[in-house]
Image (spheres, coloured by chain):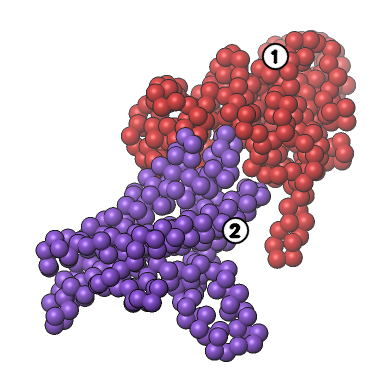
Chain colours: A purple, B red
Amino acid sequence: MRRIAAVARNTFREAVRNKILYSLLFFAVALIVSALALGQLSVHEERRMIRDVGLFGVDLFSVLIAIFVGVNLLYKELALKTVYTILPKPIARWEFVLGKWLGVMATLVAQIVVMGAALAVTLAASEGSQALDSALFKALWLLLMNVTIVTSVAMLFSSFSSPFLSGLFSLGVFVVGRSVPDVRALAERIGGGAADLLKGACAVLPNLHLFTPSGTALGGQVVSVHGTFVGSGYLAWTTAYALGYSALVLGLAMVIFRKRDFV
Amino acid sequence: MTAGASDGEPQRASAGADDAEVVLRADDLKKTFRLGFLRKRVEAVRGVSFTVRRGEIFGFLGPNGAGKTTTLKMLMGLIFPSSGRAQVLGRKVPDRQTQRKVGYLPETPYFYEYLTPEEFLDFAGALCDVPADLRKRRADALLTRVGLDHARGRPLRKFSKGMLQRIGIAQALMGDPEIIVLDEPMTGLDPLGRKDVRDLILELRREGKTVMFSTHILPDVEMTCDRVAIVVAGRVASVGRLAELLSPRVLSTEVVLKPALTGSAASGSVPALPAGARRLPAGDDVVVELPADADVDAFLRAALALGAVVLSVTPRRESLEDLFVRQAVAPGSVAA
């Protein structure tokens, strides 16, 4: 456990000393705060506008950071040859991969907390503290679960591919994953072999739409971050889904990493 | 002695360190890489066998591209052998238990450049399961030992190549290992830095550690190593003690004379050179290199008879460099 924690701590330290991440965080906070101005422009929709733009900012930037950090994570260790110093020490390769993943997750938690705090302050400044309801925190939690999967997928690609390709693949998985209900509907409509292919893709790729449920019908009721949002049962099973899917993908990354020659 | 003996080791007459426990063993290690789109086969290591015994300093020599680094990486578990066995302390590599007892410095090491030396050594210690309070004490002591006291608090990105080499050695020692494997530890160091590393290696042996290092800087090997292996084209060409590997035969004798006469008349006071001898330019003195089969006594008598003063007579035996060059340019001599 000490070794995994050491790798995680070092990964977190690397991230917090990375100026690019600060730039991304700056843009995210700027976008969230700018929602205040956008809210002023919309008539009777200030609250809705700030919340939508704010959560969109958290979603967009957390995914960008997850992909950026995730695809570079293992690749950088190999390209910069830092791994040559680490792996001959008494640390198993799977421990190293898990430590890296935990370090990125700690980074993402910190980033989402900062962005969420910016959103909360913006909402509170606009409407007072009653704007900070449970729907907001549930939505932020779901976005964290979303990047848990995105990070794991990015790390999987990073274990055998260059950052550019890994980034493209990860972005592809994210886009398709977010569109799973649409892809399923498309498959129903077109039928035939192509439909089977699309259904197969939906079965293998993560259903990331689960983490942005606002506006969809769940159990016969439309949920919304502006009104009645998801319950704790939904949070529990989507959390289990995110952690389970991440564990599978991470396990695959560990197997690939375990078999690699570090030439 | 060539690698043709049973496990690639020479037969020994002496006892002592030779009978010591084997701590590292490469047994017919081979590694073939498949490179490029066409998966072209490249044989990096073609059957390397040697053993390293407890408490010795073992030099691993070879020209660039001979397979030294690949062999060391197989011993460290970074590369999986295509065939053969790599063992540390009698256990197959990689093994968590034995990894605790080994410290490794990779070739041209790269480290996390955003860390300070203290942070990096703390990280290295944590990976070796060293408790936090001991990590702090050990890191402090090691920074002093490798001469990096002045660089505390400075991020590694601001380190020179020589300083990185020093912090690399320090991280290899953070787990207080029994065996230290250093891949080209002298690279990037100035003469003073090389001396420091040599002294450190000798000090580690005095502490009872086993040190194996690869290099192509031969004087360092002659000054430190108990035994060496020379690897050429992916195979061990020679392994054993330097005294056993180097031919005791005199290759030539260098004679320095001060002639009785100087200037253009000097040649009149130098005896005729025997067949195969050559006169080397050396100012007013006369330097003559006599071949191995020349009658040195007769030459000296003749010189004295002509009134010359004999300043020095130096028999030249085979050096490590001669052996290295002989092995490197004659791969046919490599044992299969």
Q: Is residue B10 left or right of residue A109?
A: right
Task: Name the residue: 59% across, 37% down.
Answer: A88
Task: Name the residue: 51% across, 56% down.
Answer: A244
Mark 2 → mark 1, Cα distance in angstroms: 65 Å
Q: Position of residue B40 (x, y in %)?
A: 76, 60
Task: Name the residue: 73% across, 52% down.
Answer: B33
Report the chain holding disc 2: A
In the picture of the structure, the residue carrying the numbered disc 1 is: B312
Task: Name the residue: 25% across, 72% down.
Answer: A227
The kind of residue on which mark 2 rests is: Phe
In the picture of the structure, the residue carrying the numbered disc 2 is: A160
Q: Secondary structure at mark 2?
A: loop
Q: Position of residue A82 (x, y in %)?
A: 51, 44
Which of these two is toward me, B134 or B138? B134
Binning the other alpha carbons within 10 Å of mark 2 as few (below 14), some (14 to 19) or many (20 upward) gives some
Binning the other alpha carbons within 10 Å of mark 1 as few (below 14), some (14 to 19) or many (20 upward) gives few
Q: Position of residue B81 (x, y in %)?
A: 74, 43
Same chain shared by disc 2 and disc 1: no
